[in-house]
Image (cartoon, coloured by chain):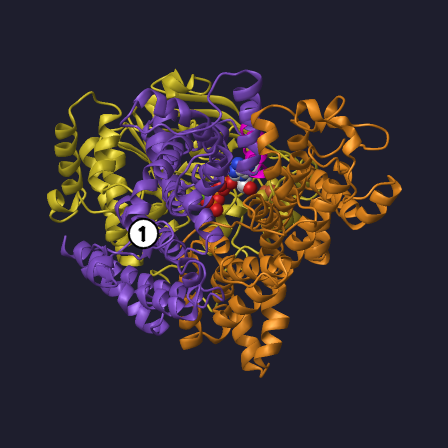
Amino acid sequence: MSSSVAGTVSPTRQAMRRMRRDRSARVGLVVVALLIVIAAAAPLLVRLAGQDATTYHIDLLDPARGNAPRGAIGGASGTHWFGVEPLTGRDLFSIVVLGLRTSLFIAVVVTLITTVVGTLAGISAAYFGGWYDAVLSRLLDFLFGFPQLVFMIALGIVVPARFPRWLLLILVLSFFGWAGLARLIRNQARSLVAREFVEAARSVGSSGWMVITRELLPNLLGPVLVVATLAIPGYIGAEAALSFLGVGVPPPTPSLGRSISDSIAWVYTGADPWFLLFPGAMLFLAVLGFTLLGDGVRDVFDVRLRRTN
Amino acid sequence: MPDLVWFLIRRLFGALLVMLALSLAVYLIFYAIPADPAHLACGKPCTPDRLEQARHFMQLDQSTLQQYLNFLKGIVAGRTFGDGTAAVHCNAPCFGYSFPLARPVTTLITDRLPITASIALGAAVLWLLFGVSLGVIAALNRGRILDRLAVGVALAGVSTPSFLLGLLAILVFGFWLNMVPVNGYVPLTESPVDWAWHLVTPWIVLAILQAASYIRLTRSQMLEELNLDYITTARAKGAGEARVVLTHGLRGVLVPVITLFGLDLGGLLGGAILTEKVFSMQGLGDLLISAVGQLDVAVVVGVTLFSAFLIILANLVVDIVHGVLDPRVSHG
Amino acid sequence: MAEPVLEVHDLHVTFSTENGPVPAVDGIDFAVAPGQTLAIVGESGSGKSVSSSAVMGLLPSNADVTGEVLLDGRQLAGLPNDELRKIRGNDIAMVFQDALSALNPYYSVGWQVAEAYRLHHDVPKKVARRRAVEMLDKVGIPDAARRADSYPHEFSGGMRQRVVIAMALVNDPRVLIADEPTTALDVTVQAQIMRLLDDVQDEFGTALILISHDLGVVAEVADDVLVMYAGRAAERGTVRDLFFRAAHPYSLGLLGAMPRVDVPPKPRLTTIPGTPPGPGSITTGCPFQPRCAYTHLVGERCITERPELTPRPGEGDHEAACHLGRRPEVIL
Ligand SMILES: Nc1ncnc2c1ncn2[C@@H]1O[C@H](COP(=O)(O)OP(=O)(O)OP(=O)(O)O)[C@@H](O)[C@H]1O
Ligand code: SF4
Ligand SMILES: [Mg+2]
């Protein structure tokens, strides 16, 4: 029997082996690792560059050109690696790396929350079925019908200004985010529950919790991991979009989306395109890296995520 | 087909229920607003007396539930605020009245809708054509240079936020090459050419980005589809490669593609908000954002409900199209 | 025997895969004449389907095909796809095992049969449809004119297989290849479908290549039999040769594994112990050697020398690939 060979290698091992062979996964992994290091060490990096994100450097601006930075490449130099922000002269490198930190922090936290909640909700719905499943399914329908971005913008009117915006962002993104995963996991888990090994585990008297953690979860690890990795770039984009629209994290906390929004006027006039390009490139890189990694993870686990309703 | 009629009636009824639940939720959330919109309307100096008057005029002194019922009634029968010469009428279907703008929400939405719809629908047509055909081409050339190119474009597309690409396009085509207008909107009725000319950049930007997910979806579905037995049957019958792919393969691919398209169309309003800001167009997104700034709850609720309505409508249409495209979907 | 319409000489099919070349078919010959039935039997994986796909030119691009495939003396292997297309479904047609997956779920059965006709006849849709209904009627679909508008999933398994047969026969092909046409069906329906194939063959003089696991069916309908083992011919001859004078130990094993109604059941059915080798895994000697119950009668040669098909003296065209000269006695 040829399967005896494959049988001795654990699925995780196999996955790791395939991961090493998949080029997009490798590139994604490197980019993501780099981004995480940058984001984690951002305050250190900023200190290393001898800068901070708040000090104004009016002397580096050219009043004749509407206070755009003096010099080429947005005023880039040995001290200000990405140049300075127009109008204020704040160090753009600091703003970009600290902005990345903000983005990744929010995206990762939201992904953790939605993954845990979505997986638990999906599995429990499949396992217990009945009215619990029915109610949950209606709730998911309801969440899918919600105009998320519109709602998130609109919510700015209701929540008092004292409430920390980053927390609001995390809560709102999580509130809508778990629904997709929950539905997917519910459908996959339901076909597992119908299979004999779960039946067998039940019949020998395993508790519901045991069946869920010992039988269902390990079998759903692949899809959960794939959805989680592919969700991160989505949340990075969503955070940036909300900040771009002025309803994300408020100043002075640096944010890539807000910097890009601030750059509009400088792009329209062409006075300082670099103010768009540096934060834009960082945002693009962050989304791209996680997307590549997610694609790789999907190929490795060979999970097909069909959109069906 | 009485089956289909029943199916439609059932689905319409279901959609109506979801819509009602949504509107109640939205109403309860937004009328829990801590700031008092009446404050803005009461003028200076705002004596408690005048504040009370304003609240009464705007019907904010009633319970939230009563206000919701008024709102529902307004949709069917219209509403009148205040009485006598100062009275303000809001004709049916009345989705609220904006006191800061002194206009019914319905009019505000219908005034702004053409701009948003022009951006969204034009782009949607482009990306559907573009995405599906590139996806098919990629699948047919699997592993070859065309495939790699399409996959690369798709990857870059899904990784670029729309506002970022929009600004880059303005920078390159509007500013450096000075080819296209960078912002503004010209109504279709005024000058169709100018209308299209002002929209061409946002269309292409949105289309490229959205097409990315269609390339990916079409490609992977087509690759799966081409392994199916009935594709071999088609070849065994003597069908040429073009016919095998376009007549026999594409049909199965279209079902998930249309599903995605429906979801995207429903969510288009959200995307258009970003595009409108990038290209300085005063569509529904602009309406919403300025309403948030002015604590204009009626407009916020109106736009939110309107976009929810679009999503539910899109889901309904997708279900129906599914039934048409796939004979195995039963309406029973 | 009449002139063969289809002849295959020294057919080799090698797939190039990640794990190296896979010689799925390793030099086989067969021929079939109009009105005659050739049965190809053998265990799963012996290369039956690959051989028939090679005849149709339907193998995936990783397959390397050599040898001759002659239709009326005209070489098909190596023809450009465009030329082959005109032959597929027109001169040589195919009936697949699983009719549900072989039919396109998105089109009505009438459309699919008509399509097969239109691919080879330049006629208006109306005419093709009339022809399709006629064909559906002929294969025994009740109320064919109305049922032509139904979709595959609306038919029973047996009726679906009739549709596939109608589709294959609509162009009056000279050769019909049926790859396990009845394995997906229950026993009574199997008999009906076989009778149908027999009837149409009588009526149109079609040459039939029947791939089957079911020796009972083979005994009933075949004229000639080719026994395949591990991509090679183990034995070849008439039905009588195989059933009364089987010369290859593998054929004997197959016969022993066959349930019979004319003899009282043995305490347990003889099956051939062991599993067939993977393609290409045995390079010297007889591929059947590890499972052969007679190899001790021959000795070394079974391991060192590959047996070629050799005629059985005094038995006409009967050939077997076995070193054992005399007829093996049945070992139980
Ligand atoms: N595309 C392919 N690539 C590589 N190997 C293949 C391919 N198609 C078939 N094979 C191999 O060729 C061999 C013969 O397969 P084939 O389908 O002809 O068997 P079969 O005799 O029809 O069996 P069954 O009775 O199960 O239908 C198998 O071992 C199979 O693994
Ligand atoms: S050649 Fe030898 S091993 Fe092969 S079938 Fe004959 S007796 Fe058996
Ligand atoms: Mg087969």
Q: Which residues are magenta?
A: B150-160
Depth check: give the residue in front, A137 or C146.
A137
Disc 1 crowd rating (10 Å Cα; few below 14, some 14-19, many 20+) is many
Quadrant of the displayed image that contains ligand 2: top right
Quadrant of the rendering where the C terminus of chain B is positioned: bottom left
Q: Looking at the image, which residue is at 34% across and 35% down? A: B248
Question: According to the image, label 1 marks what residue?
Answer: B105
Give the quarter of the image for residue B250. Answer: top left
**Chain letter for the part of the structure drawn in orange:** A
**Chain letter for the part of the structure drawn in yellow:** C
- Is C127 magenta? The answer is no
From the top left corner, tell me how far across and down residue C116 is, in percent.
26, 31
Give the quarter of the image for residue C23. Answer: top right
The answer, for residue C232, to whether it is visible in the render is no
The answer, for residue C122, to whether it is visible in the render is yes
**Chain letter for the part of the structure drawn in purple:** B
Q: Secondary structure at mark 1?
A: helix
